[in-house]
Image (tube, helix red, strand yellow):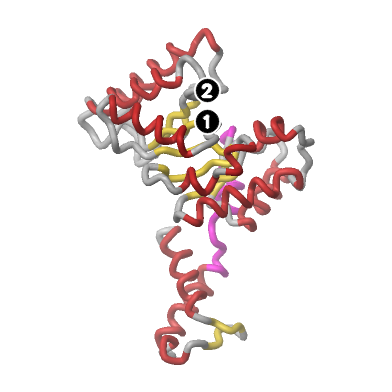
Amino acid sequence: AIFDIEDAVSVSKKDFAIDNVVSFLQDWTERDGMQTIIRTNGLDTKWGASDLAKIAIASKNFSQSGLVDGILIPKVCTLDLVKKVDAIMKENGNSGIPLWCMIETPHGVHHAHEIASFGRVEGLVFGSNDLSKDLRATQVPNREPLLYGMHRVINGARMHNKVAIDGVYNNFKDESGFTTQCEQGRTFGFDGKSLIHPAQISACNTVYSPSEEQIEFARAIIEAWHQENGDALGVITVGGKMIEKLHVVEAEEILARHNL
C-alpha cells in the first residue's frame, strides 16, 4: 500500500498529510503483513526534505518492526538526487529504509541504470503519465511512444538485480484494457504494476502470477535436470523442449519469487 503525499494531496494539505500518515503508521497495529510505502514530495518542492526528515525521525523512534517498508521518491532524474535523499535520511538518524524511485522523466529514463545502481534503491517504478507529458506523446493502448522508456527501466533494474514496477492504468473501470496492459508489462519483464483502485488487484495478481502449467513445467525442469544429471550432460529434453542450465535457473527463480 502506497500512501501518496505527492500528486494525491493539494498544496494546502501537504504538511497535514505527512503528519497524518506518520501518526497513522505509528498507531497501526493490525498490518497483517501488509508492506507500506510513502510517496513523498520531490526535493524540488518546499516539502520534500521535510517529508523525508519526518519519516526518518519517526522511524528512528518507532520501537516495532518498522514504521514503513520504503519511501517512493517522485521524478528521480539522476543518481545525485538519490544521494541527496540518502543524505537527508542519514542526517535525521535513519539509514535503513529502502528507496523506490519513480522514473517518469526523460532524464530519469536516460539515467535509469545509474539510479538503480545505488545500494539503498530497492526498485524502479515506471511513471507513464508524467513521462508521456514530458515527451509530448499521445497515450495509446499499445503504449508505443513509451516502449523505449519501459525497456530502459527494466534493463536498468535488471543490471543491478532490482525490482521493476510498471506504471498505472488510469481507467480503473476498463478491466479488459487493464488486463491487456498488465500482460504487455509482464511480457516485457516488469515484476508488477502500480494500481490506483482495488478493482484492479485481482486481474493484476492473475497476470503477474505464474499459471499452474508454468509452475508444473518449472518443477518438471528442475526434477528432470537433477535426475538426468544435467550438469554433466549440459542439455536435456523436457516436454519436447531443449533445456539448458539457464532454464533451470529461470525455473528456480520463478518458484522462489512466488514462494512456491
Q: x, y (%) of residue 217?
A: 53, 74
Q: Observer-nearest residue: 154 or 114?
A: 114
Q: In the image, 138: left or right of 146?
A: right
Q: x, y (%) of residue 171?
A: 70, 34
Which residue: 44% across, 59% down? 257
**Which image quadrant: the C terminus?**
bottom left
- Residue 200 seen: no
Which residue: 60% across, 42% down? 109
- Residue 256 seen: yes
| Mark 2, other Cα within 10 Å: few <14 / some 14–19 / many ≥20 | many
Q: Is residue 163 magenta?
A: no
Please state which of the two labelled residues, at mark 1 or mark 2, is closer to the viewer: 1
Q: Is residue 198 magenta?
A: yes
Residue 171 tag number: none
Which residue: 76% across, 32% down? 136
Image position of 235 with respect to 17: above or below: below
Residue 6 tag number: 2
Which residue: 57% across, 69% down? 213
The three-letter amino acid code for the residue at tag 2 is Glu
> Hey, which quadrant is residue 48 in on the image?
top left
> What is the chief secondary structure element of the magenta stretch?
helix
Question: In whole angstroms, how far apart are the C-alphas of marks 1 and 2?
Answer: 8 Å
The three-letter amino acid code for the residue at tag 1 is Pro
Q: x, y (%) of residue 164?
A: 53, 48
Asked whether the residues under the numbered discs 1 and 2 touch, taking CB atoms below 8 Å apart as contact, a structural biologist would say: yes
Q: In the image, 207: left or right of 222?
A: right
Q: Which residues are magenta?
A: 196-214
Residue highlighted by disc 1: 74
View extreme (top): residue: 12
